[in-house]
Image: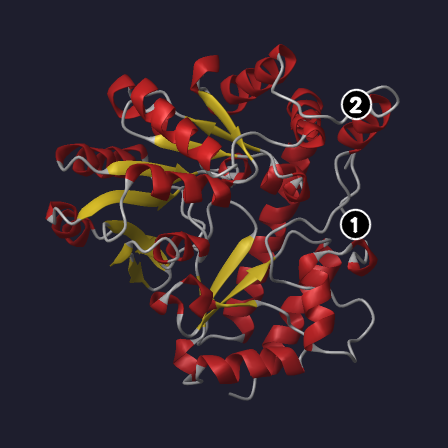
Amino acid sequence: MKYDFTTCIDRTSQGSKKWLLMREAKEDIQEGIVPLSVADLDFPMPPAVVEGLKKDLDSFICGYTLPTDAYFQAVQKWMRDQHHWEVERDWLVTTPGVVPAINVFVNAFTEPGDGVIIFQPVYGPFADQVVNHQRDLTVVELINQEGSYTINFEAFKEAAKDPHNKAVIFCSPHNPCGRIWTSKELEEVAAICMEHDLYLFSDEIHFDLAHKEYTHHVFASLSPEIAQHVIVATAPSKTFNLAGLQTSNIFIPNSEWRERYTLMAEKLNLLGSPALGLLACQHAYNTSADWKDELVEVIEHNMHSARQTIQEKLPKAVVTPAQASYLLWVDLRKYNLKSDDIMELMLENDLFVTDGRAFGQAGDGFIRIHLALPTKIAEAAIDRLCQALKDY
């Protein structure tokens, strides 16, 4: 490979959230142990991004900064080349992250007491942003058939019919199960939302990380009509390890929705992104497509290898076949262990994974394992998992 995907940097001294949480949870950790929780990459950043920022800092002033023409051109080219999606400059609103964008969405398009629909198991902050703003959470559970997830459209239709529900927060590709939704599935979601006047927010932060046999469909790219009924949230963070630079690109083709969203973002002081984040995104999109391609190759190998090993050594475990990203979703319910006992067992074996309950009730008895790691470290972690559960 051209790039370095074998070096793992101990990020404790850098203030990495997951590394600090790991050391807080357990002091006597073996050398070479890496946290398997928070979804940021444990690889060095793309070298072209690093070099580009170094050169920028020779003369750049990090004051209050808006996206430039060069920034939009980089974003537009990335969407066209990587996702076959033509975007207009007016659609773009930058925010300091996708979760802040969900915060803005909930406040802009619903009122306290309104219902917001989510599909669980799903990324925990979806529910948090609903409940924390005094909205009612309406959960539609995905259908899980031996690890393969689909949308329960009958349950969704029933929820959509309820006039109490005003909005939907959707995850595509899905976290934690790694599903890439088909265009047909997305079109059906959109049709239900349009029929019942539901505002739709699509979190597509993992969109660059489709595995080689799959194609991600940007929600707003499906048709001009659908584009007018969805907000699409993207970011370079999961792809290029830039989460700490707090830069997300939110696309809102509907001008009325965009004005409403922007006014609320200003009110909440969540409009715009940091100067270095904008520069890093621009460099990443202009220079590092080949780095991204190698990254996908590594994480896809890690995911396939882990699933194969677990199936061979832990036949009672069910591993969801991910179609995107680097998050392994493992069902341990057949071991008849309570989630607290599972997490205690993980801790004893230096496995700092994410408790499935963080993704809702449908995640009880599951764990999520982050595998954007050097392959040797990922393999060692899966071996420890198998060893931990072999006698159960």
**In which quadrant of the rendered view does residue 306 lie?**
bottom right
377 over 90 or under it: above or below: below
- Helix, strand or loop at mark 2: loop
Label 1, residues with CA under 10 Å away: few <14, some 14-19, many ≥20:
some
Residue at left offset 63%, top offset 68%? 382
Eye-nearest disc, 2 or 1: 2
Q: Position of residue 305 (x, y in %)?
A: 60, 57
Name the kind of residue labelled 1 in the image.
Thr
Label at residue 6: 1
Where residue 111 appears, as percent x and y from the top left, is: 27, 45
Q: Are marks 2 and 1 in contact (CB under 8 Å)?
A: no
Q: What residue is pinned by disc 2?
A: 61
The reply to whether residue 286 is in sight is yes
Name of the residue lying farthest toward the top: 69
In which quadrant of the rendered view does residue 186 lie? top left
Residue 216 at least partly seen: no
Q: Residue furthest right?
A: 58
Q: Position of residue 296 (x, y in %)?
A: 61, 40
